[in-house]
Amino acid sequence: MASLRKCWLLSRPFSSASAALHSRGGNISSLSRGISKYSTASAIEEPVSPPVQVNYTQLLINGQFVKAASEKTFPTLDPRTGDVIAHVAEGDAEDVNRAVASARKAFDEGPWPKMAAYERQRILLRFADLIEKHNDELAALETWDNGKPFEQAAKIEVPMLARLMRYYAGWADKIHGLTVPADGPYHVQTLHEPIGVTGQIIPWNFPLLMYGWKIGPALACGNTIVLKTAEQTPLSALLASNLLHEAGLPPGVLNVISGFGPTAGAALASHMDVDKLAFTGSTSTGKIVLQLAARSNLKPVTLELGGKSPFIICEDADVDKAVELAHFALFFNQGQCCCAGSRTFVHERVYDEFVEKSKARALKRAVGDPFKVGTEQGPQIDTEQFEKILGYIRSGVENGATLEAGGGRLGNKGFYIKPTVFSNVKDDMLIAREEIFGPVQSILKYKDLDDVIHRANSTPYGLAAGVFTQNLDTANTLTRALRAGTVWVNCFDTFDAAIPFGGYKMSGHGREKGIYSLSNYLQVKAVVTPLKNPAWL
C-alpha cells in the first residue's frame, strides 16, 4: 500500500503542483494567480473568492439537518480576513440529548449493527467514491474555513480521507473473535462486539482528516456516533456527512453537532448514555474530558493530545536536506500540528550552518492567500491563536533567544504571522517547553547522543519525534531511546491509513488509525459452553 504523505507538495516544485492541480479540472481556474515568496503585499491583497458555496449549516440529527433547539447560531470566520463565512447552528446540551437518543435508537433498533458487515463495507466504499467526486468542493470548504493551502487540502488531505474510508471498509468484514482452548470439557469463544453509542470530539487543525480518523473505525465496527465539530471549523464535516448519507448510511448512525466545548462538548463527554468517547485536542482540555467521562458513567476514553516533538539533526546529516525537512516538520499547516517538530535539536558541529540556512529558508517561505497556487502558509485559525503565538514570540525574545527571522504579524488584515526562527534556544525557555501551535521554529544545540536523548525526553509530552542521520546505528539507538508514539527517520509527517498514531505520557491514551484503532470501538465477550462427551479437547 502506497504511503500517503503530507509532504507531497514538498517533493515537487510548485510549477508541478500547479499543473497537477489544474489537471483535476473543476472550479479552480480562479486560483491560478500564484505568488513566489512571502511579502506583506502577498498577504493583504484582495482575497480570492472561494470556488464553493456553503449549503449545510444546521445540526445533523437522525439523518436530517435541523436547527438547534434554542435556534441559536454562531459565526464561522474566514481566517484570511476575519469576515463571517456563515452562521452555523449552535448546539448545546439539549441537542446533544437529541443526538444521543437518535444514536441509541439506531444502535438498539436500527439496521447498522445488525447489517451484514459486507453491506457496511459497501456503504463506506460508496462514501469514498463520493469523496473523490467532490474532492475540490470539500477542499475549498476546508481552506475557506481553516486557512490551510488549497493545494494541501485538495492534493493531500481529501484524498487521504477517501483512502481512510476504503481502509476501514476493508476491515468491516474481517473483525472476528477466537476459539480458545480451556482446561476441561468446555467450548470457549470470544466475540468482538460493537461498543455502542460513541461520542467523538474533533479539533480545528485537520477537520476532515480527524473526522475520518474518528468515524472510520467506529463505523467499520458497527457503532453509532455523535460527533462534535470544532467551533472554528464546522463546515466540511457537515458536507462530508451529507455525502455519507447519500452513500446509504441509515438515519441516526452518524449525528453531527456544531457548538462550543463548555456546552456541547461537556454535555457529550458527561452523557450517561454514551458508551465510549474519543477526543483530539489540547492536553489541558483532554484532562477535563477525561474527568467528565469518569464522573459520569466511567466510559472509556481515547485521547490524542498535544506534543512538543524533538527533531534531531545528527552531525553526519546532509545539512541542506536536513534544513528542508526540519522546516517542513515545523511550518507545515501553519505550524498548527500536534506532532510538529517544534524542538529542533542540531549537533554543535553543524549548528551554525544549519541556523543560517534555516533562516534563509524561512525568509523564502510563500505566505499568503491559501487559495493562490504556490502558497505554502496561510493564516492562523483565529485571533485567539494568533495572539497566543505572538505572545510566545515575545517571550522568546525576552528570555534571550536570538530572533533570526520573522517575529511578527504579516500584513494588517487576517491572522497571518511571519515564519519565525529562533536560535540559541535553551531548554528552560517557554518556546522550548510549551506547545506553541504556530510557525515558530526553535533551534537548540546539543553535544552527543546521551545529551540529546536526555533532553528530548525531558518533556511531559511524547507524541512524535524525528531523527535525521545517515548512520543506521545512530538511528537504531535513537528510535529505541525516544519516548514517543511515532519516530520518523529521515522523513517527517509520513502518514498512512495503516500506521498507528498516538502518544506516550501526556500526549494521550490509545492509538488512531491502523488495526490498533479498532480495539477502541469493540468489546470482547467470552462465551463458555460445557461439552458432553467431547471427542477431543
Image (spheres, rainbow, N blue to C red):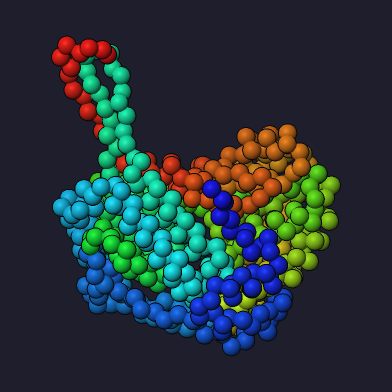
Residue 384 position, x and y percent, is: 50, 71
Residue 166 position, x and y percent, is: 42, 54
Residue 96 position, x and y percent, is: 25, 62
Q: Is residue 439 visible?
A: yes
Residue drawn at (71%, 63%), measured in percent from left and top? 421
Residue 30 position, x and y percent, is: 56, 84
Residue drawn at (26%, 58%), measured in percent from left and top? 253
8 with respect to 1 (left or right): right
> In this view of the protein, which residue sits in the foreground, 458 or 355?
355
172 with respect to 501 (left or right): left
Q: Is residue 377 above or below residue 429?
A: below
> In this view of the protein, which residue sits in the foreground, 91 or 59?
59
Residue drawn at (19%, 58%), measured in percent from left and top? 101
Residue extending furthest bottom?
Answer: 46
> In this view of the protein, which residue sits in the foreground, 508 or 6?
6
Could you tell me how many numbered marks the image carries? Answer: 0
> In this view of the protein, which residue sits in the foreground, 130 or 450?
130
Q: Is residue 423 visible?
A: no
Quadrant assignment for the C terminus: top left
Residue 75, located in which quarter of the rendered image? bottom left
Q: Is residue 349 above or below residue 382?
A: above
Q: Is residue 387 above or below residue 514?
A: below
Residue drawn at (55%, 62%), measured in percent from left and top? 156
